[in-house]
Amino acid sequence: MASSGLWTLDYEVYGDVQGVFFRKYTEDQGKKLGVVGWVKNTPRGTVTGQVQGPKEKVEIMKNWLHRVGSPMSRIDRAVFSNEREISTLEFPNFTTKY
């Protein structure tokens, strides 16, 4: 079911995800996979962001956000939304927003 198209999705990760280098590991993982987007902490204690890239790489990132995270994090759940195909990437790389 591999698609050559570009994919985008928004995410929010719940659990013990702030103060545990979650954003740094997310940015590193995004760069390693070659996807683009961003990650940031929210006032609610969650981490939110967006991922864009080839569908199969976005799926790998989605799984990483849901099951792996940073070594000291505890992921209770990850919510993905606005998942759809796009024609061009909207970001030059993967960054952490503050």
Image (cartoon, rainbow, N blue to C red):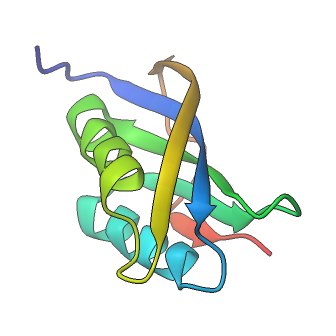
| Residue drawn at 65 percent across, 85 percent down | 19
Horizontal side of residue 66 vs 91, given as left or right: left
Residue 4 location, x and y as percent? Answer: 20, 23
Residue 95 location, x and y as percent? Answer: 58, 70
Horizontal side of residue 5 vs 10, given as left or right: left
| Residue drawn at 11 percent across, 14 percent down | 1
| Residue drawn at 55 percent across, 84 percent down | 20
Give the vertical position of 23 relative to 11 (above or below): below
Horizontal side of residue 30 vs 15, given as left or right: left
Quadrant location, the C terminus? bottom right
Given the current orientation, which residue lies at the most extreme right position?
Answer: 43
Nearer to the camera, 78 or 93:
78
Give the vertical position of 25 relative to 19 (above or below): above
Give the vertical position of 13 relative to 22 (above or below): above
Residue 25 location, x and y as percent? Answer: 42, 77
Given the current orientation, which residue lies at the most extreme left position?
Answer: 1
Horizontal side of residue 65 vs 83, given as left or right: left
Give the vertical position of 15 relative to 85 (above or below): below
